[in-house]
Image (cartoon, rainbow, N blue to C red):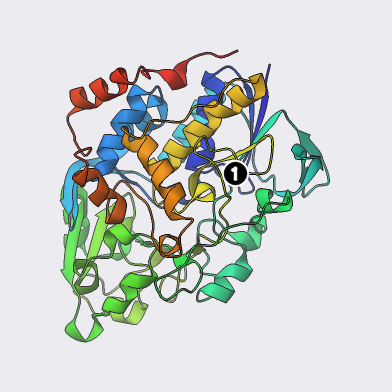
Amino acid sequence: MASIVIIGGGWAGCAAAVAASQAGAEVLVLEKTDMLLGLGNVGGIMRNNGRYTAAEEMINLGMGKPFDITDRAARHTMIEFPGHSHASLYDVTKVEPMVRRLLEEMGVKIRLMSRAIDVIKKGNAVKGILMADDTIVEGDVFIETTGSTGPMGNCLKYGNGCAMCILRCPSFGPRTSISQRAGVEDILGQRGDECYGAFSGSCKLNKDSLSQEIRDRLNREGVVVLKVPAEDVKPEKLSVKVCQQYALKEYAENIVLLDTGHAKLMTPFYPLEKLRKICGLENARYEDPYSGGKGNSVRYLSIAPRNNSMKVEGLENLLCGGEKAGLFVGHTEAITTGSLAGHNSVRLALGMPLLELPRNLVTGDIIAYANERIKTKEGLKKRYTFAGAEFFERMKERKMYTIDKQEIERRVSRMDLTDIFNEKLI
């Protein structure tokens, strides 16, 4: 039996756990907070634009379980909002327990409030993970999915201070870069002005703090767009966002609210007094981050160099996924990269050749394309997502974007990869 240890229980880590378990491994997830999914607890947007294509590819590749959960937890499907089509919005208040139950039913072991602080190495191999309680967790292969947000010092240095986000560093301790502790230098993403990092692209408002009319429209339609007063339009804010797929003028000129259980406010931060000048938001209150009137979490400050099978360069038995694996944005992107890392962890443990997804699948292309671009100065300023910006344009140019499920099924079948992630290797 192969023993796979996953450090970080966000969407990438949970997808890696599903894939490694489906391949037959014994899987342990280490998560420093008291909940799985990390930023997935405040996100919620699925299947918008090219993410629909990617989700259906992953389902046909054998990773349907995460998408079954997000589909079942959806509050709204096939909605439209500026720059985005056929989106699903899952309920952020319901999805984490559903994922936790799935992993437990699959036999995945989960250790919550378990913070990794260092690496035990032998040569170029990781032998164990040193925990904050001084215990050592050993395994055959390790997967780092710790994300790229935190510790607090990064938000102080590159942002507007700790915004008290869902990751709660003051309570659960700082994120540790496992790859860096193992001797591999991290890559840092940049903004357009070459400052490091980028702000998370949205906040959550307490829905009950909004007017009855806005609550009713959100519950009924899933989206509400409100005009920003002319004196408060700040187009320059778009350049500081992680989510370049939302860096459109509509998001500077309007308040865009999406219903994900809370009201998802599509801007990195917005001064509360200015927000309350807008009709219907007179009593608005932030749910995440609590300091959403001043700032947000800063991301892309810890990326591991890796190959297209998700193996970290320079180490024999460490893989990575999610934001740790590149300048990726979104849950679908985290699930995609985490799934490949989880599957390949078992192949690596067994001495098998590692799988690279072909570039005529969008899931394979984004992994390879982002890896190429991160090696360039300009590429470090970009973000890569199926939902917009540079990579979605690439999808359309290459005629890879489609919502035709039968066509997507044929693409995966032509590559002889149907259900590859569901194949027992042990």
Q: Is residue 194 left or right of residue 186?
A: left
Q: How many marks?
A: 1
Viewer-proximal residue among 73 and 352: 352
Q: Measuring 59% from the left and 22% from the top, which residue is drawn there? A: 347
User: From the image, which quarter does the N terminus lie in?
Assistant: top right
Q: Is residue 230 left or right of residue 308?
A: left
Q: Is residue 326 left or right of residue 86?
A: right
Viewer-proximal residue among 356 and 231: 356
Residue 110 lies, with reference to residue 382, above or below; the image says above
Residue 91 in view in this figure: yes
Residue 104, position as x, y percentages in the image: 56, 26
Viewer-proximal residue among 21 and 124: 124
User: From the image, which quarter does the C terminus lie in?
Assistant: top right
Q: Which residue is mark 1?
A: 8
Q: Residue furthest bottom?
A: 231
Residue 352, position as x, y percentages in the image: 60, 20
Residue 93 in view in this figure: no
Residue 419 lies, with reference to residue 109, above or below; the image says above
Residue 15, position as x, y percentages in the image: 49, 33
Residue 254 lies, with reference to residue 73, above or below; the image says below
Q: Measuring 75% from the left and 40% from the top, which residue is drawn there? A: 124
Crowdedness near tag 1: few (<14), some (14–19) or many (≥20) residues, C-alpha within 10 Å: many
Q: Amino acid at mark 1?
A: Gly
Residue 278, position as x, y percentages in the image: 22, 76
Q: Measuring 19% from the left and 22% from the top, which residue is drawn there? A: 406
Viewer-proximal residue among 41 and 179: 179
- Please tell me whether mark 1 sits on a helix, a strand or a loop: loop
Q: Measuring 59% from the left and 68% from the top, which residue is drawn there? A: 154
